[in-house]
Amino acid sequence: MRMNILLHELRAYRKSTIIWTISLIMVAALFMSFYPSFTKDTEEFRKLLEGYPAALREAFGINLDNFFSILGFYCYGLSFVTLCGAIQAMNLGTGIISKEVREKTADFLLTKPVTRAAILTNKLLAAFISIIVTNIFYITAAILLAYQVATENFDVGIFLLLSLTVLFIQLIFLGLGIIVSVIFQKIKSVLTVSLATVFAFYFLGMFSSTSGDEAKRYLSPFKYFDTAYIMEHSNYETPFLITSALFIILAIGISYFIYGKKDIHTV
Amino acid sequence: MNVIEIKNLTKMYGASRGISDISFTVEEGEIFGFIGPNGAGKSTTIRTLLSLIYPTSGSATIFGKDIVQFAPEIKKEIGYLPSEVFYYDNMKVKDLLNYSASFYKKDCRKRIKELANIMDLDLNKKIDDLSLGNKKKVGIVQGLLHEPKLIILDEPTSGLDPLMQQKFFELLEEENRKGATILFSSHILTEVQRLCNRVAIIKEGRIVAVEKISTLKENTYKKFKVETKSALDPHYFNLAGVNKLEVKDTHTSFLFKGNINEVMRKIADVEITNLWIEEPDLEEIFMHYYEKEA
């Protein structure tokens, strides 16, 4: 580990980590603030939602059985938190290498007495820490918010399991971002690339859940963690957990391989 | 001892040429010039030496160690200044230099201050706010702060005013006296002439010559320009060793290589009003190499 690179990267991520953390908390807070009014008119909302086609409800992840419990309601908001989190992670991943190329600092870093693997390791570690910090603050805030608005007791364990899906999906998109970053080093706008990729997967996930085909869930990371399943079993679905882990390991492995061999051109 | 040894180094970019079959050595304590026009392959060679890019074939060693296999180890003793410097914008000069220093296992604080003084660089400014010339100075300090044994410079003078350039050259000469070997790439011949002991001339990805600067100059001609009172017979200076003879009324000019006394005698025999004898500059020698090859 090279502390100097790690610290430098962390410093560079400081501002964006704070902004993203606040954004995630705001999204959750916004949803939670609706909860009291939802619970007041439960029956009317239920009728309204029942009037929508089932496919549409599926696409938006609305499950009528638990929609009106605090956990069920949280799940609905969570899908938007996850979306934001995925963008944050994809940004971090995509920026890992392309930032050096875009700011033309690659020459500076790569002519220092460090291996490319060490550079990548420390940059990855910094991105990982940034995501972990975001999640610690987010989950703490989310639990506090839930206690504020909850009208009945809820299982904090399940709440935690649900919230941790943000972290898992972030790690998947971090991995995806790194691969994109090492393959296409000259990315002009990280945000464009990451928004496009994240939304593509988000919509892919929406369509795959309307068809009800189990296998299609593998296509979009957004469908790897079914909140209804988690609430029912207090656990994750093992095949998807394994798929996530494999994808992350593979993505990182491939990135090391490509980055170690890649020519660094002048810009 | 050879600090740099390049053997049949080739780098292709897909099917297009980068450099092909380059071989030369740089000895310890030398200031070695690497000259050629833009796009000839200077940067490609240097970037390969620094393992920013990897060779297609051939090999090279620095301090006797393979450039690919021992890249991180070699770089402990290399200072590199690229032609265009770009650094993390939101940092102060001092923070960037400390970051740079943090990669070397020695205390560089004193040297940073010394170098900043010599180059007249304000350490407390943000890199964002610096002019091109001042950014270049940051690059120079960054490249020298760990007192490297090998200094690699890729077109280092662009953006420096003549005064700073002078200081920079003095700094390099001082480093050289202290034992540093320098590889200096440039397309500006006067600076190579001013600084270097030997040069390699590169053209279209190939080395055309590796010569001592002194030999380069010895083996060449002198430029004569004679102004006479009355127009001369166009064939008057037509003797062995004379080239590019041009006669225009009372002005005669030619290049000469050979025994200079013969020409002087011929000149003494006519009534002249003015006379110029000039050493060709490196540029002309250089063009000579290029034309010969073409």
Image (tube, coloured by chain):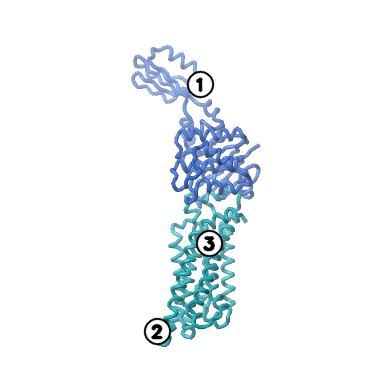
Q: Position of residue B96 (x, y in %)?
A: 53, 48
Which element type, helix, strand or loop, lies under badge 2?
Answer: loop
Q: What residue did someone put label 3 on?
A: A178
The residue at the point 43 percent across, 62 percent down is A192
Q: Chain of mark 2?
A: A
Which element type, helix, strand or loop, lies under badge 1?
Answer: loop
Q: Is residue B134 visible?
A: yes
Choose mark 3 or mark 2, whichever is in front.
2
Which element type, helix, strand or loop, lies under badge 3?
Answer: helix
Marks 3 and 2, how far apart at CA? 40 Å
Q: Colour of chain B?
A: blue
Choose mark 2 or mark 1, whichever is in front.
2
Q: What residue did someone put label 1 on?
A: B258
User: Within 10 angstroms of label 1, few (less than 14), some, or many (20 or more) residues?
Assistant: some
Marks 3 and 1, how far apart at CA? 66 Å
Amino acid carrying mark 1 in the image: Gly
Q: Position of residue B250 (x, y in %)?
A: 35, 18
Q: What residue did someone put label 2 on?
A: A52
Nearer to the camera, A15 or A204: A15
Q: Position of residue A197 (x, y in %)?
A: 46, 66
Amino acid carrying mark 3 in the image: Ile
Instruction: Tell me if residue B111 comes above or below residue A200 in the rendering.
Output: above
Nearer to the camera, B180 or B256: B180
User: Within 10 angstroms of label 3, few (less than 14), some, or many (20 or more) residues?
Assistant: many
The N terminus of chain B, quarter of image:
top right
User: Within 10 angstroms of label 2, few (less than 14), some, or many (20 or more) residues?
Assistant: few
Amino acid carrying mark 2 in the image: Tyr
Marks 2 and 1, how far apart at CA? 101 Å
Q: Both on one chain, marks 3 and 1?
A: no
Count of marks, rendered view: 3
Q: Chain of mark 3?
A: A
